[in-house]
Amino acid sequence: MSLQTQEVILEPQKKKRNKKKIILISLGVLLAIGLSLFIFANGYINKSLAETEGTIQLPSLENEVTVTTDGDGVPHIKAENNHDLYMAQGYIQAQSRMFQMEMSRRQASGTLSEIVGEAAVGHDKYFRSLGLRRAAEESYNIYSDESKKVLQWFADGVNAYIKQAKEENSLPVEFTLMGSEPAEWTPVDSLTIGKYMAFDLGGHWERQAFNYYALNNFAEEKAYELFPVYPENKPTIIGEDEVDVAASFENAIIPHAFNGSNNWVVSGEKSKSGQPLLANDPHLGLATPSIWYQMQLESPDVSVSGVIFAGVPGIILGHNEKIAWGVTNTGPDVQQLYLEKRNPDNPNEFLYEDNWEEAEVIDEPIKVKDGETIDYEVIETRHGPIISEHANESAKDTVMSLRWTALEATTELEAILEINRASNWSEFEKGLEKFLSPAQNFVFASSDGTIAYKANGNIPIYENGEDAQLPLEGWEKENNWKGYIPFDELPTVVNPDKGFVATANNKIIGDEYPYHISNMWAQPYRYERIAEVLAAGNDLTAKDMQALQMDKMNLQAREFVPMFAETLDSVELTDDAKKAMELLLNWDYKDNVDASQPLIFHQWLDEIEAILYDGEIPEDVMDLFGSRGQTTDELLRRGNNSIWIQENGGIKELLSQSLENTMDKLVKEHGKEPADWKWGDYHKVQFYHPLSDISPVLEFFFNNEDPISVGGSSVTPMAASYDSETGIVDHGASWRFVIDTNDMETGYHIVGPGQAGHFKSDWYHNQMNDWVGGGYHVTEMNAEKGMELTLTP
């Protein structure tokens, strides 16, 4: 072979080696750039992690403040005066939850469009119409000077963090992604967030709108079957100007129907320690970060531990060294829709007692990111804001306004600050006089052995409780509320003979009570199970209370499965349906994660509702059909006496067809053998971050845990309500708390999914598995161990 030939052969090999070398060098450069970018991004992201050790200067402090963060991420703040205590609380909250605080105040104030853009305009219009921020501003004006100081001290702490984070370029990465920065925090921001929580707990206006729709679209008797209470007087409000409910409220934002809670107190006579036990688990939306932030506050005259909404000072639920308390939603009729007749010659005048009355017109300009500012006006009648945006088109000159206790000036935070310092029932109840909205079921326990309960808040007086089921004619004076139930006449129980008090959004008092509370209550199953366990129990412990919070007994199934089986006994079923019935009849009625029966039962109920309602009620109107489960249960109890069931072939046809539909669906999704199905294959929990839907990359970082299979359901004490399309649990026990008042220093908590709002924090999602499995962490009032941060003047 000649040298020339060798060169010809070697040249391609040399080129290949050079090409390979270039590729390797390029990859190395890209890797180095990528690594540098990663290091830079990682360093940038880490800058916004909350500082838990060392020293930080806060110029407005009067003395040093010590913040000890325990192993569960709970900050224990110790200050020499209240000014420093609440300023430190604002700073520490902002360190961990600033983006959440920012989004909360914007959501409630109707200013999301400023950072989100046009997509949020509908949301902002609704909340501007509702006027939570206007109500917060009015409320601030009636707060005491002392409470205003607390609000300002807290705001000063938040602003100290904002100033520092901007200077150090260490704001949470979410602000960078949104292209925004937080503005100065104000006392009204904190009160607005409080008003939003009242909104989240609702008050039944949407069900009034639905009932109005039903009366206008179904035969009278058929419509009344959907009412929560069958009205004796059958009030009918159908005028010439019928309002198109679907169009009027298509942009309305409806709180989740499952927002509620469990709580109970047990006397020392039934406890092993001889002292009262208290348990509370509020049921709200499950997301990242948690609605709640757990803290302990200590100064010479404050020593309290528990949880608070991010953006608000004090401790709303928890305990101090003498007392403990918890809440559930009372769910009274505190919202009333009014039909308003508009003057055809003046759109800002409305009829009242045969006269045209001028309404207030409020300018609410909406700034839109990358768009023009929208000139938006809100009209408020004597009853409240007009919230039926499209009613002009659908009903000519008839619109709907909303009266709601939360839109009035109220002083909940002032009540909380007093409760935090209370040492007995008398002082605690005195503080409750200032807690007006939302109305809540407070349970109380103290180290002196007292247990107590009060349904507390402004609850309107209706002369006829049936009136609260429909919109009322706003032009008639007789339809106005007659004031509120006097504080001393609100339902109250102290040291009951049975040794416990429990609530689970159930009907709280009998028909002998002289005032109307509500026509709408949660299905009774959670309460019945809790009461069943507490009544049977003796020598109860904190561990027993934790087990009851995690209890998965389904009393709805215990009622209906035998009824369904008896009804279908003579019906020829498909083979799959027969297998389902056999499994259900051999069920212990626990919604356990590994059981197949909960999957069959809950899907069966969904299919029953689909047959009953889907062809009759439009999807957008279904959103207004609050407490639908309660109505469906009652229709099933009536059986063939129900028009809705008669029109679907009778109870046997309804149950057999819905069961067959259920099994057809489940076989396709889970396989041919029902005994192998598991509730947890469908029913899973994931605490989604609000920005995780933007891209798969953000979802990877913000939702860094896979969904976890979980037991329970919306009708079990372990509350786990889910999206029926995906099976994802999105509402449930946002915080679980148990205390034995024999040891007031120690509380047992679960804050799902964790304390921190930063996805790189050790406390970001560290309580997800605890939430599923009941792994409570212990929080001591006198935490001596942990990471120590000193805040100095």
Image (cartoon, rainbow, N blue to C red):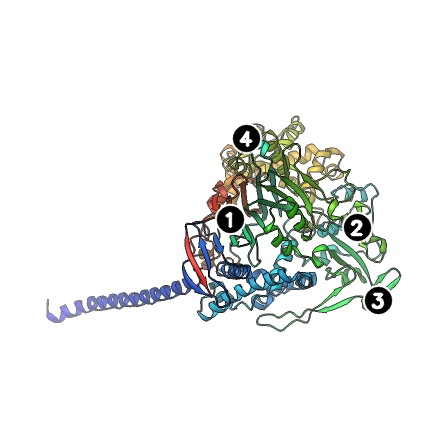
Front residue of 108/555: it is 108
Q: Residue 619, percent across and down?
A: 67, 51
| Disc on res. 752 | 1
Of helix, strand and loop, which one carries label 3?
loop
Is 456 above or below relative to 712?
A: below
Q: Which part of the image, by quadrant, shows the N terminus?
A: bottom left
Q: Nearer the viewer, mark 3 or mark 4?
A: 4
**In whole angstroms, how far apart are the C-alphas of marks 3 and 2?**
24 Å
Give the amino acid type for the residue marked by disc 3 in the picture.
Answer: Pro
- Tell me if I can see residue 729 in this picture: no
Kindly indicate whether the residue at mark 2 contacts the one at mark 1 (C-beta within 8 angstroms).
no
- Are there few (<14), some (14-19), or many (20+) residues within 10 Å of tag 3? few
Write down the residue under mark 3: 344
Disc 3, disc 2: CB below 8 Å?
no
Q: Disc 4 marks which residue? A: 539
How far is mark 1 from mark 4, CA to CA?
29 Å
Disc 4 crowd, CA 10 A, few/some/many (<14, 14-19, 20+): few
Q: Earlier in the sequence, mark 3 or mark 4?
A: 3
Image position, residue 509 (x, y; %): 72, 39
